Amino acid sequence: MKKTIIAAALAALLSGCSGERQEDEAVSQPRPSVITVELGRSHHPRFAGLYAAREKGWFRQEGLNVEFHAGEGPSPEQMVSSGQAQFGVDRLPEIIIARDGGQPLVNVAQIFQRSGAVIALRPGLKSLKELKGRRLALRYCDSEAEVFSALSGSGLSPGANVGILRIQEDEPFSSGRFDAVSSQTYDWVVRADTEPAVTAVKLHDTGLFLPQDALFTSESVLGSSGGRDAARRLVRAALRGYIFCRDNAAQCAEISSLYARDIPKDRAGKMIEEVNRLIWPASKGVGWTDARAFRKTASILYRRALVAKQAEGDGFTNKYVNEAQIYLRSQDVKGKPGR
């Protein structure tokens, strides 16, 4: 029944919107239905490409009325699999774990090609191995899968020989409550100046390959022609937004401030510059899911017993990204940030 309802809603949304068009040609769709994209617990400059696609009118040009949801409640994976949102954004490991748990999710665009995860160590500590017998603070907005995999790779057992303290907001090491804290390069960049003696270990540099933000949907959405068309149009506009933010970080900081209102524009600008380093360069074009990278991520999760079985190849598709890259062929879909 749920699949029928979703299919009908998306079919209604996209009626009269078939066919290709030039990038800047407006679509005559005055009152399109709403598509919800679930972003998780809070708005953040890391979603600047999506915000730009909305504010610049590119979703509208595709015949889509996109609304973003961020706030307390179920995870993006739960929201999408239950049909409360049609699309979501989350880190690839979380999507694979959710699919392993029975949620029929499909990655339709791998936006971040790298991981921005870091574990910051208090002054005096230099390596993750030194956390044995100490405490690590895990922020609610950081991936447990990434952090626990990094600790396991250093011979540590979360909760056994490393205490795990869960925190809601950033707090300084001077609080004395922990010896290390999880973070992201795009968050840590605005904090590093105040704690210059801290060692920040980038998990990607340790060989832990767990790419982060991906745009995903459910098999139910992709099971209808209307849902597939929605995915095609959403990916096309979203990738256009991320290309724009690569080349216009300052303008995207202004746009982000409309959503992540508690983050000053100067901080948002620094964050977006760091986010761009996780997306660009994109050797196979922005949004492309590399099958080997996907399997490697799944293998790491399996070895760390975070999933019960190896992920199958049907957990992602490059169909919509490939079509989007052809559509956006007049733009640089692979380039470096700040070029």
Image (tube, rainbow, N blue to C red):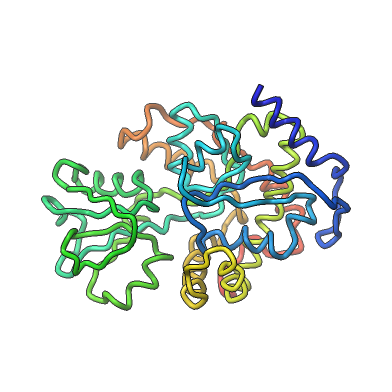
Q: How many marks?
A: 0
Q: Is residue 230 left or right of residue 253?
A: right
The answer to which quarter of the image holds residue 50 is bottom right
In this rendering, is residue 274 above or below 19? below
Q: Nearer the viewer, residue 309 or 162?
A: 162
**Residue found at x 66% / y 67%:** 244
Quadrant placement of the N terminus:
top right
21 left or right of 144?
A: right
- Of all residues, the one furthest to the top in this rendering is 1
Q: Residue furthest left?
A: 133
Is 198 on the left or on the right of 39, as rendered? left
Residue 313 in picture, x, y percent from top left: 54, 32
Q: Is residue 54 left or right of residue 29?
A: left
Q: Residue at x 80, y 37 (%)?
A: 12
| Picture layout, residue 178 above or below residue 261 | above
Q: Nearer the viewer, residue 253 or 330?
A: 253
